[in-house]
Image: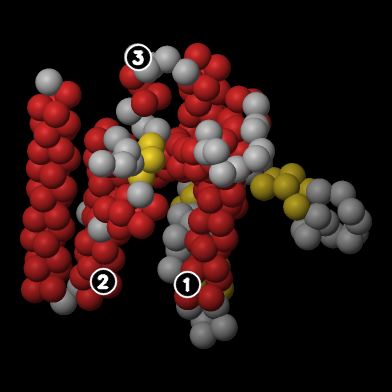
Amino acid sequence: MKKKKTKRKFKINLTVYFILRILVIICMVSQAIHGNWNSVFLCVFTLILFTLPTIISNKLNIELPTILETTVYLFIFAAEILGEIQNFYGIFTHWDSILHIINGFLCATIGFSLIDILNRSANVHITLSPFFVALVAFCFSMTIGIMWEFIEFTADRYFLLDMQKDRLISTISSVKINKKNENVPVVINDIIKTKIYSSNKEVFTIKGGYLDIGLIDSMKDLFVNFIGALSFSIIGYLYIRNREDNYKFALSFIPKLKKKE
């Protein structure tokens, strides 16, 4: 009975993998026909990312739960193909936030699993309490989130890619516009329009407010990553405290060492 369930889950996972892979290939061909080579590169990159779960599973000798592996595939597809190429980030207001919550959740599962496996290994002579295992998982997830924001900032700063999506704000507070040069912020409310003048005499008008250059986006991403990381850390903590085999939700996301034949 258990073997039948395992085979069925494997078939579901394989079906999702191949459907997404075919969709990525179709998208890649379409983008190549239209000469969008940056999008073609993203498609190739996505296909490479699809192979990571299998490589990690084989190299580290761990078994990835079907739900976890399927979620990873869907997350990659949603971020790269739907988000970047199909511009879901622009079309759907909270698309980026949803993905960052999922990212925080998934990274916490990875950090939790690594520590939990070591914690239960006979070769490791350190045993952490459930609280510290959950804390390490949380910190691992937040570190990944911070590193990603570093990547976005670097890409925007040096390659001008605007990965930190700018947004309009109607209020600013800054000491830079203090006419007396004092360390007292000047607050400007209800901004309706700003103008940007370049050295080559181009003038850009931004209607609706002042353009924030990524700060709000980065802090929002870290905050929702925090929510995802905290959510699984709590779940992981309760799982270790109980260690019940029927704790199905937690077990659906926690990788385990493969059993020796």
In this rendering, which labeled residue sits more in front, label 2 or label 1?
A: 2
**Which numbered dot is residue 160?**
1
Q: Position of residue 2 (x, y in %)?
A: 17, 24
Quarter occupied by residue 97 = top left
Q: Position of residue 191 (x, y in %)?
A: 59, 46
Residue drawn at 52 percent across, 63 percent down: 151
Q: Earlier in the sequence, mark 3 or mark 2?
A: 2
Q: Position of residue 233 (x, y in %)?
A: 54, 29
Q: Is residue 97 visible?
A: no
Q: Is residue 182 visible?
A: yes
Q: Position of residue 114 (x, y in %)?
A: 50, 43
Could you give the CA–CA distance between mark 3 and mark 1, rounded to whole angstroms? 50 Å
Q: Would residue 105 appear left or right of 46 to someone viewing this image? A: right
Q: Which of the image's four quarters has the C terminus?
A: top left
Q: Which residue is mark 3?
A: 246
Q: Would residue 93 appear left or right of 135 to someone viewing this image? A: left
Q: Earlier in the sequence, mark 2 or mark 1?
A: 2
Quarter occupied by residue 38 = bottom left
**Which numbered dot is residue 173?**
none
Q: Would residue 21 appear left or right of 68 to someone viewing this image? A: left
